[in-house]
């Protein structure tokens, strides 16, 4: 029986017939053998293998993979400049490639570009923040948005201004490369790292090293899908590291274990993707600080070589691990390292104390005796005049350092005791506040339908309005997070919120379709990990302020001792919560 299929047999027959014709014409032959060596002997030659992208045949690639195969997104800089001269928006396949430069044409939501700047480790200097505000003031919409990855977006940019915008970023020591499309996104770090008195290690140098390694290795662009990496210092403030593809958590070994000296190490967690209701899980691996970057680089290359390039919905690292299991992923990773990865049970490590919920808001003592002040920026929307005032405060009372948080707020560190009250007063004078128990302090919202074609609701506008209404009607004494995301992409990570809301279109009895939300309850991260449970479906937005007011008042009336909102909603079944809400409504009506 032949080892070849009829199709392969036909191909080989045609190949040999072509050789015969060449020989008959007296033309010299050049081919390659199975080892790739060149030969002039037709009998040693083999047909060239079918071209693939890491083993995937070209004709099986997804649309986006075909776009990447035909032209690397980093090679479209000339197109950016060419279109700028004519003030024309990008079209066709280059729409995707422009995202390699962090440029998103967000039509039909806006006839404009959105720029996403990388902010490695979530750290900005005041002059950099001022520079981003200048971009927004001179060429954009007059505001900057803090994102859920602790970086900055500037919106409403025109094609003619893109080259100047990119040049300005470089002048500021920033970049937007790789901040969109199938690339490693902004590398996050605990926002208080370096000055957090509870942390085990300063992870900002690691986050920055990871950032620069990614930027300077071209093969790390164009992954099968986007990829997130985070470093948690073990301090008091969360960076939601367990929502990342790779999360490095600082831990302590108190005594010698398996030949390892006591000290600070990192646990590695894998495959966090909360939009799919999955947190990162412990890999069983313990690493030194110096080993984290090489291990991440090795995992990235295993993902590049083996991730699914045929189905966009199955292309994240999670799905490769679902197929392989973590042991095989680690086995393939180890082949790319010169050192062994240590397997050590989590129980042998001492994990840091629980995170302080909303510990990024308000005034706290630093390890050096100074203070940091966390400022509420509702949904991260920061008008340029406010940016200037914040930078003035950072320069006058701090060190010019500013930290962004994945909660879309910001921190000014290095404030001396004698300047703290003046700094607080300046924050209030700027139109902001720093109360950790406020509803506005716990708002997280994606761009929404004013700037994203996928969103079904005006998340940022709804969130701000909700906070204003609820803060006027409910007096909370515990922090609470409300996450509003516009669609099932879950950019605002609604499943980790105390209250999570996902935008949907709701059909009214009249037949009219209006903005609304599905609502989930009880989510959390880190030591309070929990995927929020669905409670209310397809609620028109107009009904939500009253519904949430009732919900929060029900919590205050029926909580046990000082249990948190998340604890309250997890203790009870959803139907029990609804029954208590109805009971409260009945009493009010009576």
Image: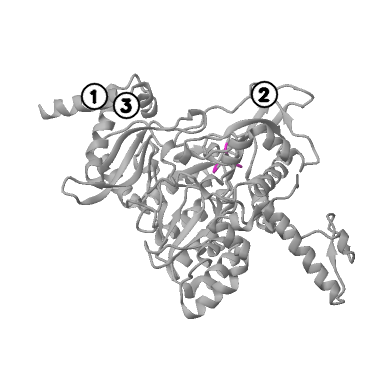
Colouring rule applied to residues: one colour
**In the image shown, does 307 or 382 lie closer to the viewer?**
307
Crowd class of label 3 (few under 14; some 14 to 19; many from 20; radius 10 Å): some
Q: Along the polypeptide, which appears first: circle 2 or circle 3?
A: 2
Identify the disc placed on residue 574: 3
Q: Nearer the viewer, mark 2 or mark 3?
A: 3
Answer with left or right where residue 253 lies relative to residue 395: right
In this view, 404 is above or below 74: above
Identify the disc placed on residue 579: 1
Residue indicated by mark 2: 345
Kindly state the secondary structure of the residue where label 2 is placed. loop
* Label 2 close to label 3 by CB (< 8 Å): no
Residue 430 visible here: yes
Give residue 94's position: percent from left, percent from top: 53, 67
In this view, 78 is above or below 549: below
**In the image shown, does 471 or 458 lie closer to the viewer?**
458
**Residues in magenta, as a range:** 191-196
At horizontal 28% and vertical 44% (from top left) the residue drawn is 466
Kindly report the distance in space between the C-alpha atoms of the residues bearing marks 1 and 3.
Answer: 9 Å
SS majority, magenta: loop
- Was residue 194 drawn as part of the magenta stretch in this picture? yes
Residue 195 visible here: no
């Amino acid at each position: 029986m032949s080892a070849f299929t009829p199709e392969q047999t036909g191909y080989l027959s045609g190949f040999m017939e072509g050789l015969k014709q060449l020989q008959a014409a007296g033309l010299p032959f050049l081919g390659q053998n199975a080892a790739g060596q060149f030969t002039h002997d037709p009998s040693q030659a083999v047909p060239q293998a079918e071209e693939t992208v890491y083993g995937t045949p070209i004709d099986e690639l997804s649309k986006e993979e075909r776009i990447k195969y035909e032209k690397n997104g980093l090679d479209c800089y000339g197109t950016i400049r060419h279109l700028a001269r004519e003030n024309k928006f990008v079209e066709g396949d280059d729409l995707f490639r422009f995202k390699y430069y962090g440029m998103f044409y967000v039509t039909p939501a806006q006839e404009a570009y959105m720029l996403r700047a990388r902010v490695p480790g979530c750290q900005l200097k005041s002059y950099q923040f001022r520079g981003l505000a200048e971009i927004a003031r001179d060429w954009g919409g007059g505001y900057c948005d803090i994102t859920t990855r602790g970086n900055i977006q500037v919106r409403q940019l025109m094609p003619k201004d893109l080259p100047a915008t990119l040049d300005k970023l470089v002048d500021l020591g920033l970049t937007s490369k790789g901040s969109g499309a199938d690339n490693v996104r902004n590398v996050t770090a605990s926002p208080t790292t370096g000055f957090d008195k509870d942390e085990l290690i300063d992870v900002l140098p690691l986050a920055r090293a990871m950032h620069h390694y990614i930027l300077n290795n071209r093969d790390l662009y164009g992954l099968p899908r986007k990829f997130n990496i985070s470093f948690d210092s073990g301090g008091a403030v969360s960076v939601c590291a367990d929502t990342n593809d790779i999360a490095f958590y600082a831990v302590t070994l108190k005594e010698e274990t398996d030949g390892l000296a006591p000290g600070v190490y990192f646990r590695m967690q894998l495959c966090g993707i909360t939009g799919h209701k999955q947190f990162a899980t412990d890999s069983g691996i313990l690493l030194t600080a110096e080993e984290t970057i090489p291990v991440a680089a090795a995992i990235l290359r295993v993902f590049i070589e083996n991730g699914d390039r045929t189905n966009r919905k199955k292309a994240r690292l999670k799905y490769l691990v679902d197929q392989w299991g973590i042991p095989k992923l680690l086995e393939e990773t180890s082949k790319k390292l010169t050192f062994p990865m240590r397997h050590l049970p989590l129980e042998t490590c001492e994990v840091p104390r629980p995170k302080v919920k909303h510990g990024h808001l308000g005034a706290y003592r630093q390890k050096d005796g100074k203070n940091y002040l966390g400022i509420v920026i509702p949904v991260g929307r920061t008008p340029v005049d406010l940016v200037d005032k914040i930078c003035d405060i950072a320069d006058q009372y701090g060190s010019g350092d500013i930290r962004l948080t994945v909660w879309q707020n910001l921190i000014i560190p290095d404030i001396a005791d004698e300047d703290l009250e003046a700094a607080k007063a300046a924050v209030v004078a700027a139109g902001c506040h720093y109360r950790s128990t406020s509803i506005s302090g716990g708002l997280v919202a994606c761009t929404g339908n004013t700037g994203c074609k996928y969103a079904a609701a005006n998340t940022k506008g709804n969130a701000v309005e909700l906070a204003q209404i609820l803060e006027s009607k409910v007096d909370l004494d515990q922090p609470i997070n409300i996450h509003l995301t516009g669609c099932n992409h879950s950019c605002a990570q609604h499943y980790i919120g105390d209250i999570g809301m996902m935008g949907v279109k709701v059909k009214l009895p009249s037949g009219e379709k209006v903005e609304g939300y599905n609502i989930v309850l009880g989510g959390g991260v880190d030591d309070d990990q929990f995927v929020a449970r669905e409670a209310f479906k397809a609620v028109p937005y107009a009904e939500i302020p009253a519904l949430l007011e009732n919900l929060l008042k029900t919590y205050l009336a029926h909580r046990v001792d000082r249990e948190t909102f998340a604890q309250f909603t997890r203790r009870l079944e959803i139907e029990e919560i609804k029954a208590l809400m109805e009971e409260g409504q009945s009493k009010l009506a009576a």
